Amino acid sequence: MLEDYLMICDCDGVLVDSEAIAERIIVSRLEDLWHGSGIQEVVRPLLGFRTGTVLARTAATLSRSIDQSQIVVIEAAVRAAAVSAPMIEGIAEALSAIPLRKACASNSNAEYVRDVLDRTKLVRFFGERRFTADMVPNPKPAADVYLAAARRLRVAPERCIVVEDSVAGATAAVSAGMTVLGYIGGAHSRHEHANKLTRIGARNVFDHMKQLPGLVETWVRTATGATTAPSSNGP
């Protein structure tokens, strides 16, 4: 029965604590470029979008200019630092305790996600079930990457549960017709972020990965009509 269900995890901010790293680099580079203040307040709500989108929207909001060559340099700096980000505390234990097939759906590129999963050894939970922004026409907040995962793995969207930390990602998953669990335990998250994820449609919001197996178990019971909890059998 459980093979008909799927858990999909975002990468940055869910598997590895990389969003705070991205924020720090983006803000620092833009402060050097523009010699202004108020940049962090604009950047933080945009985390989860592609880096180029964060930069372009920040420039537009602050009525500043940034050219493509500058965007490419900052994107490379973010990628180089984020790939070495530490794992989110408790994520490996949580994934081990959840007896569902697992996939990763990220707004980053395939090479980056592969490197992150290999380095952290989290690849053992996902195998080749990796779906990234460069594999689909439109990145998050469009639903494309989540729908691609569901199609490829032959699971109906309503039988997918997604772990997301960003507004863009949660919007994408909800638009795909999937259940969303909003994670707010990353170094970049703030209290008000929980309200944003809830308004988007997250079923639950949680701040530590030790809570994740129980939240998924409750969803599985509801989705399957089961009266007893499924036992964990690893990835």
Image (tube, helix red, strand yellow):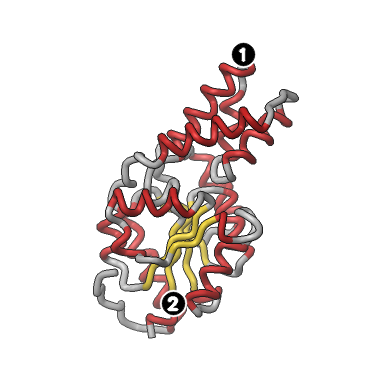
Q: Is the N terminus in the top left, top right, bottom left or bottom right quadrant? A: bottom left
Instruction: Verify CB contact (< 8 Å) between mark 2 and mark 1.
Output: no
At a point 73% along the width and 31% down the height, the residue shown is 60
Along the horizontal axis of the image, is 195 left or right of 124? right
76 or 203, which is in the foreground? 76
127 or 215, which is in the foreground? 127
Does residue 69 lie above or below 224 as drawn?
above
Secondary structure of the residue carrying numbered label 1: loop
At a point 32% along the width and 64% down the height, the residue shown is 125
At a point 61% along the width and 28% down the height, the residue shown is 70
Does residue 154 lie above or below 182 as drawn?
below
| Crowd tier of the residue under label 2, counting other residues whose Cα lies within 10 Å: few below 14, some 14–19, many 20 or above | many
Tell me which amino acid carries mark 2. Tyr
184 or 155, which is in the foreground? 155
Along the horizontal axis of the image, is 81 left or right of 229? right
| Residue 147 sits in quarter | bottom right
| Crowd tier of the residue under label 1, counting other residues whose Cα lies within 10 Å: few below 14, some 14–19, many 20 or above | few
Q: Position of residue 165 (x, y in %)?
A: 48, 49
| Residue 51 sits in quarter | top right
Q: Position of residue 154 (x, y in %)?
A: 50, 80
Q: Earlier in the sequence, mark 2 or mark 1?
A: 2
Residue most extreme to the front: 69
What residue does disc 1 label?
A: 35
Q: Is the C terminus in the top left, top right, bottom left or bottom right quadrant? A: bottom left
Secondary structure of the residue carrying numbered label 2: loop
Q: Which mark is residue 5?
A: 2
Number of numbered tags placed on the structure image: 2
Q: CA distance from mark 2 to mark 1?
A: 50 Å
Q: Position of residue 111 (x, y in %)?
A: 44, 51
Tell me which amino acid carries mark 1. His
Q: Which mark is residue 173?
A: none
